[in-house]
Amino acid sequence: MLCVLRKVAINTIFVEVKTVNAMKTGERLPDVLGIDANGKEVKLSDYAGRKIVLYFYPKDNTPGCTAEACSLRDGYEALREAGYEVIGVSKDSAASHRKFADKYNLPFTLIADTDTALNQALGVWREKKMAGRTYMGTVRTTFVADEQGVITHVIEKVATADHAQQILQIVNNK
């Protein structure tokens, strides 16, 4: 994994930001994933022997993120039948995740990565540009891992409205 240290202007104040290239196939996910919507620590070892879909999204209750979460909700049983557990990650708080999960009946774990530690560890916390503004944020990415937590697929071009089907097609076309 390549780390780059550089300075980024945020509101005319320069801060140093460490960017890491995204984890790749063949690398192992970290054991400590973070804190869920109920304040419980989530570890990869909690899912021992199960395959994982670990998806990173920018923000609860935004159109693209809601479409992605609802696609995964609607395809949840098919993903489970294929042997996968789904875990979502964003920078939002645990309280925001509880409301988001309740509002859309999401049956899977959402991790509150408020300090972006997991985003940074997997290399999805990156510089983004929108409307002429540069800022740091989560780049929508999904990591699919085997029963040992080794990444088998990285999906960077996420089809938000059809993400569950996209994952199933990718894992079934090995």
Image (spheres, rainbow, N blue to C red):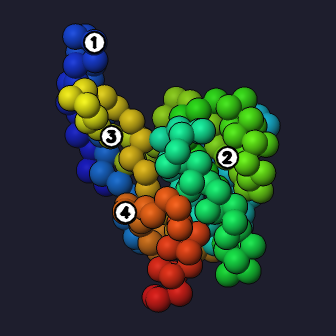
172 relative to 69 in the view: left or right: left
Q: Earlier in the sequence, mark 1 or mark 3?
A: 1
Who is closer to the viewer here, 12 or 42? 12
Residue at numbered disc 3? 126
Q: Amino acid at mark 3?
A: Arg
Percent position (x, y) of residue 146?
57, 74
Residue at numbered disc 4? 157
Q: Earlier in the sequence, mark 3 or mark 2?
A: 2
Q: Earlier in the sequence, mark 1 or mark 2?
A: 1
Q: Amino acid at mark 4?
A: Lys
Residue at numbered disc 1? 11
**Distance from label 1 to label 2 (Cα)?**
30 Å
Percent position (x, y) of residue 104?
73, 48
Q: Amino acid at mark 1?
A: Asn
136 relative to 64 in the view: left or right: left
Q: Earlier in the sequence, mark 4 or mark 1?
A: 1
14 relative to 30 in the view: left or right: left
Q: Nearer the viewer, mark 4 or mark 3?
A: 4
**Distance from label 4 to label 2 (Cα)?**
21 Å
Q: Earlier in the sequence, mark 4 or mark 2?
A: 2
